[in-house]
Image (cartoon, helix red, strand yellow):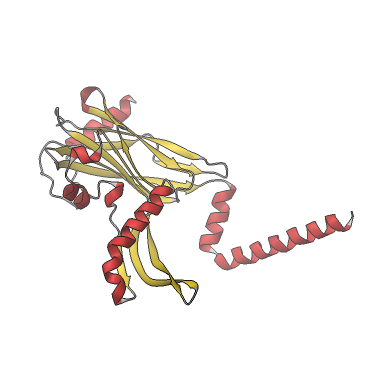
Amino acid sequence: MIALVSALFLLAAQNPPGPSGDTVPAGPPDVAIALTDEEVRVTSGFTGARLLIYGVAPGYREGDDLVVILRGPSQPLTVMRKERIAGLWLNTEPASFAGAPSYYAAASTRPLHEIAPPDVLRRLGASAEYVPLRTAGVQSSDAAPMISDYRRAIIRLKADKGLYRNEAGEVTLQEANLFRAEVRLPAQAPVGDYEAQVILFRDGGAAAQTATTLTVHKAGLGEAVYNLAQNQPFLYGLLAVAAALLAGWLAAAIFARR
């Protein structure tokens, strides 16, 4: 823990630039962030994880707020509207999104609506309600006005699955302007590279921010199967078919003896 605290103070002294999204002053106050674990191993019995994220804000003063965001790898999405046509329910008016975070959690010292106005939170993507979704294109001109509806639908569905969440009160201040955040990673969280970001808010705006990365990956037999499916899909398909045939043959042989 002492080594972690020392590393945080060294990081803060370097004044790393924050990611794009809002104007951040070049000088103090600075923030630094570190993870107790830089990787999460997902095994066959993985039921989720509770991540501890530590940081230091040397310029923190009374009245400031901290928001710690954990974003999962971006994934493309296609959304369609269901309509009843000639007695049948059909998918219509598709809209594609080039990138949507597969997971998003925002832990904060207070409820986000008390920290900053909606336009600031939206510009920074600092709330599950304002998760940035990049539009790839619209296959129908009539679907363009519905993009905002599609965005809300994606966010609502992700939130229902526990993949998009705001966690007020999960960031706590400790001695020497150190802070600690807890973020829950559900069992269905996808593998890949995650970004952990911290934003220091002052007077309703972002005063400083920085980020680091976290890797979530398969482990054990699950890792071998996942790598095979990703790197050699044809061989994976053949093995899946062979396994299904073998299972069917064994079942038939067992029941034939009865």
Residue 199 visible? The answer is: no
Residue at screen point 74% across, 58% down: 247
Label count reads: 0
Q: Position of residue 170 (x, y in %)?
A: 32, 33
190 up-or-down from 241: above or below: above
- Seen as rendered, the residue at the extreme top is 175
User: In which quadrant will I find the C terminus?
Assistant: bottom right
Query: Residue 64 falls in which quadrant of the image?
Result: top left
Q: Position of residue 126 (x, y in %)?
A: 25, 46
Query: Residue 229 falls in which quadrant of the image?
Result: bottom right
Residue 186 visible? The answer is: yes
User: In which quadrant will I find the N terminus?
Assistant: top left
Seen in the image, is 70 located left or right of residue 204? right
In the image, 34 versus 248, the foreground residue is 248
Residue at screen point 21% across, 51% down: 122
Residue at screen point 51% across, 62% down: 231
Seen in the image, is 186 located left or right of residue 20? right
Residue at screen point 54% across, 50% down: 223
In the image, 162 versus 42, the foreground residue is 162
Q: Position of residue 21 (x, y in %)?
A: 19, 52
In the image, 52 versus 62, the foreground residue is 62
Q: Position of residue 164 (x, y in %)?
A: 37, 47
In the image, 71 versus 237, the foreground residue is 71
- Seen as rendered, the residue at the extreme right is 257
- Seen as rendered, the residue at the extreme front is 87
